[in-house]
Structures are given as C-alpha cells and as structure tokens.
Amino acid sequence: MLVPPDLETPLLLLDEARMQRNIVRMQARMNELGVRFRPHVKTSKCPQVVARQLAAGAQGITVSTLKEAERFFADGITDILYAVAIAPAKFDHAMRLARQGLQLTLLVESVAAAEALARHGHTHGHCHAVLIEVDTDGHRSGIRPDDPLLASVAQALRAEQGKGARVAGVMTHAGSSYALCDPDALATMAEQERAGCVSAAERLRAAGHACEIVSVGSTPTALSARSLHGVTEVRAGVYVFFDLVMAGVGVCSRDEIAISVLCSVIGHRPAAGRVITDAGWMAMSRDRGTQNQKHDFGYGAVCDVDGQPIDMLAFSDANQEHGVLQWSGGAGVDLEQRFPIGSRLRIVPNHACATAAQFERYTVLSADDRIVEWPRFGGW
C-alpha cells in the first residue's frame, strides 16, 4: 500500500494486515498447546488492537499500570491481571476498580507487600486476589520456586470471612529469553519457565493453598514452548507488532514487523556521508536493544518509504529531534540526489513497546487499503 505524501512526520505507521497475522499466529499456537492466552496490552495501549486480540480468542488481558486496567475496563474488559508488584499507594485504586466490577488480579513478591495488602483488605472489608511472582531465570524479580520465602509470602496472604487477600496463583516471566537466538535454547528456556512455575504452584498446593492460576510467558518462550503441561495461562505482548530484537532472537522475520516510524529527510552532511531526518530518539526512543545481538541496528533499521530495507544506510546516532543516518555504500553516491530533502524513509524499531510509547496514535495502513488513525494512550 502506498503511503500518502502529505502525512506530517514523524509518525507511527501500523500495518494492520501484518499485525493480524501475528495475532492469529500466537492464538493458534496457544490453542494448539491447550492453554488460555492473556495478552499483555502494554505494547499497544490501543483499544482497536486489543479488540482484535480478544476477537481472535484471547481471554482477559495483562496490564502494567492501573491506568491501563481502568481504561480497558471502561471498554468492557472485566478480567485483568496487573502484572507488576503492587505498591501500597495503589491499594485503594485497585480496590475501587474491583468494587466497580473488575475481576482484578494483583501481584506481590515479598512478605512485606503481602502483609500490607492483607491488612488493607481486612481494614476495608475487601478480599484482593493475588498472584505471587516466581523467578524462573534470575532475570529480574520474583521468588525462586524452591525458596522457603514462597510459602512465607503465601501465608501472609490470608483471608478471613471474605476479607484480606488470597493466593490466586503464581506468575513468572522468563525475560532472559530476549538474550537468546537459538531455537533449542529458546525451547529449553520455555521448559525451564514452565517447570519452575508449575513446581512453585505444587509446593503451595501442598501447603494448603488453592493456587488455581499458573501464569507464564514472554513472546520468545510462548512461541518456543513444546509443552505447557500444568500451566493455565500464557502472557505475551510484543508479538502483536514484533520488532528488531524479536527478529534477532529468531521468533519472527523482519517482514513480520508491523510497526515503523515514517520520517522525512531534512538535511545532509555529504562529506561525512550522513543523511539527517526528523526522527531522533524522541520518535524512536533510546532503546538500543539490538546492540548485543549479531546485528546492531543502532536506533532502528532504515527502509525506503515502501518498507524495503536500505542496508547501506545505518541509523548510527540520534539527538532529540534529529536522526543521523550513516551511508556505508561508498563515496560515489550523491546522497542529496538519492535522498533529497523532503523524501520519506521508514525506520523499523528495536523495541516496539518503547517506540510506540513515543506517540499518541497509530497511523494505520488498513487491510482495506485505507489510512485511518487509532488512538494510543500513555502514562501511569
């Protein structure tokens, strides 16, 4: 589809057909593995995108902020997991949403947080549903499956006469999978994630906790898992758009990436072999996630206006509003003629979540050959 020449740049382009194929692919895989799929909507923060995920078969959503929970609850989504360990200042907000009818599940990873949440529930006559975060790869946060602290946190989540907090289950995220690129290593990590979280659930059940939810997931492990025995649900987010990091991991190809930033050429430095655009790090974000992969794309992969890669033009540097592209194709090319002022380029992002967060809307290249805009919200 042709991109209209009058669009003001920089802007965030979304290829709806690619996105829909990504949605169908993930949902089909989860159906094949026999688990419920709860997509993480922090990637898109867009009602139109989430509606398509739910229409494909997703059940409930995952959020990273209570603002997301509130926004999507207003759209009629009533089953939401807030998958960041909750801070005490947010207890009242979470309770308000639950009392309005939202089935909101919270997350803790410490005895202190569990005790505080239980006290809050008792004080206000409310029972919080809570998952305990489990660390299955040493990547970020959570409790190791065999750590006695797991049982202590569960014990602190006590409910009496429908008041306090209850253990609804366990949750893990194998974020270290982002550093892998071998299919067998990814499958091994997916199994490590599954086995660790299931083990944690079994330990809690043996201690008398119901632990009905066993929630795992990241885009690489979700697409690499060979068995999800004992798991009740999977979460993944960036799969809906994909990005260069995911292509480097090996779970998608570059032509499956659904978003890009449209920018305009605004200057040249011929002697240095540079082309200057109006999309700096304020448009792309400062995420340099590919710098530790086999191919470092700088601040993103440069393509022509139709999305075809220009491999000899690298996004080597960025200022707030200026993108600096470095030509490596030799000195015989007239950059001012090849990339004239006002010409358009598309930059494929390293990290879809971070780049999308720079914009208030998606300019959608729709499946029926129309250009439409979908809103995106941000903040906390």
Image (cartoon, rainbow, N blue to C red):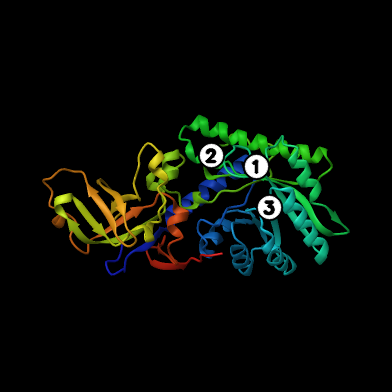
Dot 3 lies on which element?
strand
Residue 27 visible? The answer is yes
Could you classify mark 1 by the number of other residues whose Cα lies within 10 Å: few (under 14), some (14-19), or many (20 or more)?
some
Residue at the right extreme, as displayed: 161
Could you classify mark 3 by the number of other residues whose Cα lies within 10 Å: few (under 14), some (14-19), or many (20 or more)?
many
Q: Position of residue 287 (x, y in %)?
A: 42, 51
Closer to viewer: mark 3 or mark 1:
3
Q: Which residue appears at 60% of the width and 53% of the height?
A: 57
Closer to viewer: mark 2 or mark 1:
2
* Left or right: residue 204 compared with residue 31: right
Q: Are marks 2 and 1 in contact (CB under 8 Å)?
A: no
> CA gap, disc 2 to disc 1?
24 Å
Q: Are marks 3 and 1 in contact (CB under 8 Å)?
A: no
Which residue type does callout 1 highlight? Gly
The residue that mark 1 highlights is 34
The residue that mark 2 highlights is 176
* Left or right: residue 281 compared with residue 61: left
> CA gap, disc 3 to disc 1?
24 Å
Task: Point out the tag, 2 or 3, that comes first from the N-terminus.
Answer: 3
Q: Is residue 331 above or below residue 51?
A: above
The residue that mark 3 highlights is 107
Dot 1 lies on which element?
loop
In the image, 379 versus 69, the foreground residue is: 379
Dot 2 lies on which element?
helix
Q: Position of residue 347 (x, y in %)?
A: 33, 54
